[in-house]
Image (cartoon, rainbow, N blue to C red):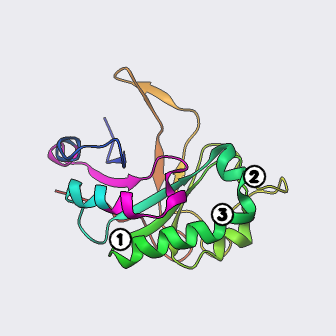
Amino acid sequence: AGVGAVALYLGVASKKQLQAVLDAGMGAFFVTLASEYLDGASDELAQLKNLGAPKGATVFADMEGLKAYSTAGAISPVLNAWSKEVVGAGFIAGLYVGSPQGLTSGELWRLPFITRYWKGQGSTRDRNGDLAEPAGCGWCLVQMYPSVTAGGVLVDHNMVGQDYKGRVPTLVMA
């Protein structure tokens, strides 16, 4: 049906689900549940190991909603610690930037270990009401609006492309 990849949420996805995605000829990448990155990456890294995720795959922290917005002043150090662990374990750290967004474009860009950015649906505004975009690199994934129902399942379609530096998310493939 034109689907080339599936986002698997850590803490929910099983090895059987990952294998089903791969057996269907699709790629997979990994995402934290919103707000689950706030306590470091050890749980996510254990889940990646249990899934058999290969090093080099992209893992996105899902930063959206009021918890992420209300912690804007403290979120950069938390994301830095999370992404440093992810990168240190051999994965690529990414960030899903939803709305409302507590970080400004400049603050997004200054996260030193995050190198892939995924734009959430609609207009992604920062705490000042300005458009939020990781200045200097842009998005490698963009979530399209609106969500649709396909086969009885609510689906968010995403477009994959190169960011301004030519980077794309790294998928797991069979």
Q: Is residue 98 magenta?
A: no
Question: Can you see residue 115?
Answer: no
132 and 16: which is toward the camera:
16
State the image coordinates of residue 32 (x, y, percent, origin top left). 44, 52
Q: Which of 146 and 34 is in front in this view?
A: 34
Please tell me which of labels 3 and 1 falls first in the chain. 3
Query: Which x, y percent locates residue 146?
Result: 57, 33
The residues tagged by marks 2 and 1 sit, at their Cα atoms, a distance apart of: 28 Å
Give the residue type that dot 2 points to: Arg
Does label 2 or label 3 sit earlier along the sequence? 3
Q: Which of 79 and 109 is in front in this view?
A: 79
Is residue 36 visible in this depiction of the protein?
yes
Left or right: 46 as drawn, with respect to 94: left
Q: For the N terminus, give its image quadrant.
A: top left
Q: Give the amino acid type for the residue marked by disc 1 in the picture.
A: Phe
Q: Quadrant of the C terminus?
A: bottom left
Mark 3 or mark 1, whichever is nearer to me: 3
Instruction: Point out the stretch of residues depicted in magenta.
Output: 21-45
- Look at the numbered disc 2 and give the secondary structure of its residue: loop
Label 3 sits on a secondary structure element that is helix
Task: Quote the CA–CA distance across marks 2 and 3.
Answer: 16 Å
